[in-house]
Amino acid sequence: MIFSIITISYNSEVTIAKTIKSVLSQNCKDYEYIIVDGASTDHTLDIVKDFETCFEGRMRWISEPDNGIYNAMNKGIKLAKGEIIGIVNSDDWLEPDALETLVKVLKDNPDNKKKILTGEMLFHYTDGTTQHFPTSYKRFEHYSKRYRMGINHPATFVPKSIYEKIGLFDEEYKLYADADFFVKCYEAGVGICFINKVLSNMYDGGASNCVSKEMLDDSLLKIRKHAKSPFELWYMTINTYFMYCLRKIVPNSCMKRYRYLKNKE
């Protein structure tokens, strides 16, 4: 089996059907689908069960309390039997040819099976507009050196062997364990294959897209874990506090324009 697709959910009755349908509609069928639910109290599990037979034995799910989103992701990774793991959260969705595109990339160069595979993403705002998020090594390096997310996680697929080498997500984080993981991959020199095609879609409704105290705490934790010197720790801590305060007062429309300009670089 090539792929394991993991969806984590909690009270996701409004969005999870779209996520599940995007996996079900994949042209490539060489995958298993794992849903890790955090003991939802709404109709999420009813929706999951309604789709279960459509996957003809390729879907597995569990529902139990967890200790946050990264604890749930780690549960899914431990359950995964596929060679390459993709995480599609319950308000995100894949393009219909996402897995087919990855299979072609693997056939073109078998060494890519040992690399992180990452593509482009469309970000969908609550006002109905979308924004394209590109991918490149230059972008990945730029953000990784600042201990930030340099790739589009919803459009990223990681060989299980890399999780075994680097480790799973650090559950000390509430929002940014994925950024921490990919910074570790950068620092360890893990190979990455950049795919110039949209593979996934992300909706502007997740916890990591909201300005919060947890966002600040996680940003400071990343700096403490990765800073290479006392001066860097001091400088980046001051900068992080400044950017957090700025984001608290700057209108969302301005942040949207800023992201657009950054993605054009």
Image (cartoon, rainbow, N blue to C red):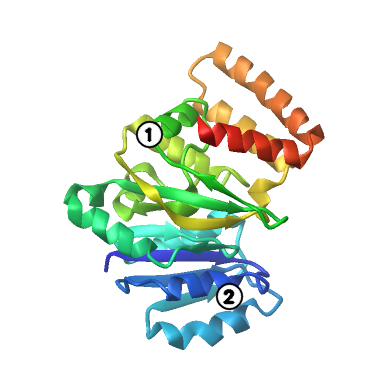
Identify the residue at image location x=26%, y=53%: 105
* Residue 18 versus residue 192 in the image, above or below: below
* Residue 74 versus residue 223 in the image, above or below: below
Identify the residue at image location x=46%, y=31%: 144
Mark 2: amino acid: Ala
Q: Name the residue under label 1.
A: 137
Q: Mark 2 points at which residue?
A: 17
CB within 8 Å, label 1 to label 2: no
* Furthest-top residue in this view: 231
Mark 1: amino acid: Tyr
Identify the residue at image location x=53%, y=52%: 122
Give whichever of discs 1 and 2 has the lower sequence position.
2
Instruction: Give percent across and percent down for residue 89.
Output: 55, 61
Q: Residue 138 falls in which quadrant of the image?
A: top left
* Furthest-right residue in this view: 249
Instruction: Give percent across and percent down for residue 90.
Output: 58, 65
